[in-house]
Amino acid sequence: MTTPPPTPHTRQNEQLPAPDPRLFNADLAPARERTWGAYSIFALWMSDTHAISNYAFAASLFVLGLPAWEVFAALLVGISIVHWLMNRMGHAGHRTGVPYPVLARASWGVYGANIPALLRAVMAVAWYGIQTWLASTAVVLLTLQIAPGLAAYHHNAVLGLSTLGWIAFLVMWGLQALLLTRGMEFIRKVQDFATGPVVWLVLLALAVYLVVKADGDISLTRSLTGLSGASQLKESLIAVSLTVATFLTLVLNYADFARFTPDHRSYRRGNLMGLPVNFTAFAVVAVLVTAGTIAVFGEAVHDPVKVIQKIDNPVVTVIGAVSFIVATIGINVVANFVSPAYDFANLAPKYLDFRRGGMITAVLAVLVLPWKLYSSALVIQYFLGALGAFLGPLVAILLVDYYLIRRGRIDVDALFSADERGAYFYRRGYNPKAVIAFLPAAAVSASLALIPAFGALAPFSWIFGMGISGVLYAAVSRRGRVAAEAGPIPYGMIPSQVRAGAAEEPGRPGGSGAAVVPVPAKGS
């Protein structure tokens, strides 16, 4: 075993050089202000889980034939696995105080980290555009409800969108850009009081309305299609796996949010309330509403927007449309904007900060013409599906490196150093061991996800990718493993002497702030 690189705890009295401008700016530096308490993390998960796609997923399991209680059980198991993974990644993000692309430098190298960062960014850009377009379709419906005379502008097509469609899309694009470029602290305040809670109010009202209209005649034990026990078990396992796969994007970049928590209790409690508790409760309401549509409308409707339309009340339609527009903005902020904003900033920190990285994300989201992406099942399957297959291997490499190889001993200052003798410079700034672990795992995972012959295994492809990359990375990195006598993984924030040569200006919104030596964190 080799001796691990010196940790910040052994170098506190050293005078370190300024961070390399090719690797540093104030937004990528360790977080200075840590204002994301347990409620903010809880609201973060409300914003993400209260998506129409998650609603439809839970409802579709019920429509497929799983009894309601089995839907709840499968989703609870899946989200509990997600909860465990989020706590593991949150530990690393909280202690280091750095965003995902900077944390990835420890395992991929100070320049190699751009590989996993860009893979995550490309996926986020595509989905950012798709979610913006989906929200704009609700704007079109809302506009036509209020002003039917504008329907004349909804029959032409320019690059696949009508004039009204383009106006709605650009309005949503502009509103999000205005919100997102205000920075992480502004995002926190908006999600705390708007994007998360508002959807709960609408869905609870829908559930109560339908249960009352159905005179309470809703069964939670009956299978709609009479699936056999073996088929129910198969579908339940698929539901568990797909639940985890859906959240792997946020597992990967959860450090982007956990870095702003003041102690371990904040992200742990927020994760508990927002994932197992809130997600399962959301699934319960989704299934209740879907079951209610069977009794009230005579058919299972698993799209909440269509449920609102069937009620056929203009006031309900307007309130529902506005609520789901807000919900879509919420998930776009959490899942598809913050990560690429940091990922693009990591490419050229001297020139790109969080704001500029965010604007690159927004502009690219228009250029990919997301409505064309979403309308092609082939593109969705092969482009986004292949990228999704890479997430498991990337998550495994980060977690194995932090927990098994380094035992939580990260030299935060070295993450910003391009010195060839630096702890994370490896070979020309790239760690070949991460590449060796990633490529075969990604190839297997993508093959299982995309080749029709492996269709039965496709929902579980991320498991194979994660397992292969984790084992390979642990094997090829064993010589660099921190000695066992290093003790348990520490909980305190890692002190950093990184000096902010380009410290953020007072009152500048959006940055995380220059690094300072933080106070020790409370244990969990």
Image: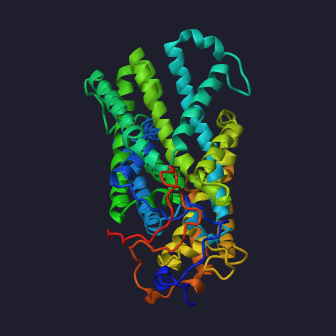
| Residue at x 49% of width, y 14% of height | 146
Q: Quadrant of residue 309?
A: top left
| Residue at x 49% of width, y 80% of height | 8
Residue reaching furthest to the front: 506
Whole-percent x, y for residue 242 in the image: 51, 50
| Residue at x 58% of width, y 72% of height | 415
As drawn, 145 above or below 494: above
As drawn, 209 above or below 437: above
Instruction: Name the colour scheme.
Output: rainbow
Whole-percent x, y for residue 447 in the image: 68, 57
Q: Is residue 21 left or right of residue 329?
A: right
Q: Visible in this render: residue 357?
A: yes
Q: Quadrant of residue 343?
A: bottom right
| Image quadrant occupied by the N terminus | bottom right
Q: Is residue 493 left or right of residue 182?
A: left
Which of these two is toward me, 63 or 33? 33
Q: Is residue 463 left or right of residue 434?
A: left
As drawn, 87 above or below 183: below
Q: Visible in this render: residue 332?
A: no
Q: Quadrant of residue 480?
A: bottom right
| Image quadrant occupied by the C terminus | bottom left
| Residue at x 56% of width, y 84% of height | 5
Whole-percent x, y for residue 424 in the image: 62, 76
Which of these two is toward me, 114 or 402? 114
For the image, the number of numbered tags is 0
Whole-percent x, y for residue 505 in the image: 53, 55
